[in-house]
């Protein structure tokens, strides 16, 4: 697990993380059997910090990796979803400039992440009867 990528994606600053990091983290879940569990544990641990920027970024990474990563990651997050559910009631001290907006963004992102975590539809990239490989065959 590359902690450098995860640290960049979940930094406490106001800047949004670069988009390529989401894909890189999702690809890391396919590296080894324990990789998904380690990434999930790291993100859930960071999600428990009381910083709205960190929470928001962790929830975005969780949502993206649930959509694009290995299904084992999604199952690991489902087992410990109470940490994500706690973000639905998150309230921080109001920011002097932004007010309650950071807390509301965390609550909205937690809702979107939970919908993705418990989404029972198969991924769009999976091979099913509707997603046949096209080729030069006789059919």
Image (cartoon, helix red, strand yellow):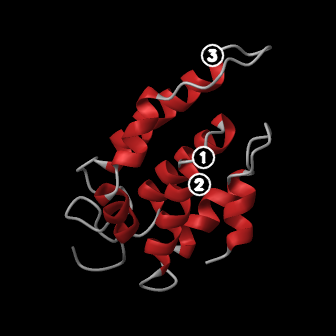
Specify few, some or many for label 2: CA neighbours under 10 Å numbering under 14, 14-19, or 20 or more. Answer: many
Judging from the image, what secondary structure is the residue with disc 2 in?
A: helix
Direction from residue 108 to residue 138 in the image, left or right:
left
Secondary structure under the numbered disc 1 in the rendered image? loop
Q: Nearer the viewer, mark 1 or mark 3?
A: 1
Q: Position of residue 59 (x, y in %)?
A: 53, 45
Marks 1/3: CA distance? 18 Å
Quarter of the image containing the N terminus? bottom right
| Residue 100: assigned label | 3
Residue name at image x 53 percent, y 58 percent: 45
Task: Give the CA distance from mark 2 to mark 1.
Answer: 6 Å
Q: Position of residue 30 (x, y in %)?
A: 48, 78
Q: Tag 3 or tag 2, which sits nearer the N-term? A: 2
Q: CA distance from mark 2 to mark 3?
A: 21 Å
- Marks 1 and 2: in contact by CB < 8 Å? yes
Tag 2 near tag 3, CB within 8 Å: no
Residue 70: quadrant of the picture: bottom left
Q: Is residue 120 above or below residue 70?
A: above
Where is residue 138? Give x, y as percent. Answer: 23, 79
Q: Secondary structure at mark 3?
A: loop
Q: Residue at x 79, y 36 (%)?
A: 14
Q: Which residue is mark 1?
A: 49
| Residue 46, numbered label | 2
The foreground one among 29 and 34 is: 34
Q: For the residues labelled 1 and 3, say whether their Cβ atoms are less than 8 Å apart.
A: no
Q: Quadrant of the C terminus?
A: bottom left
Using the image, tell me which numbered label, if any, was put on residue 4.
none
Task: Establish if 21 lies above or below 72.
Answer: above
Left-right relation of 15 to 59? right
- Image mark count: 3
N-terminal label among 1 and 3: 1
Choose top left, top right, bottom left or bottom right for residue 16. Answer: top right
């Amino acid at each position: 697990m590359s902690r450098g990528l995860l640290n960049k994606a979940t930094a406490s600053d106001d800047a949004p993380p670069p988009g390529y990091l989401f894909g890189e983290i999702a690809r890391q879940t396919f590296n080894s059997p324990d990789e998904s569990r380690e990434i999930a544990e790291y993100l859930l641990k960071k999600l428990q910090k009381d910083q709205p920027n960190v929470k928001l970024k962790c929830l975005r990474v969780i949502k993206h990796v649930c959509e694009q990563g290995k299904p084992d990651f999604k199952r690991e997050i489902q087992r410990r979803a109470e940490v994500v559910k706690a973000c639905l009631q998150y309230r921080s001290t109001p920011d002097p400039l932004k007010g309650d907006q950071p807390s509301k963004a965390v609550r909205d992102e937690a809702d979107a992440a939970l919908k993705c975590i418990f989404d029972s539809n198969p991924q769009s990239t999976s091979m099913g009867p509707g997603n046949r490989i096209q080729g030069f065959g006789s059919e």
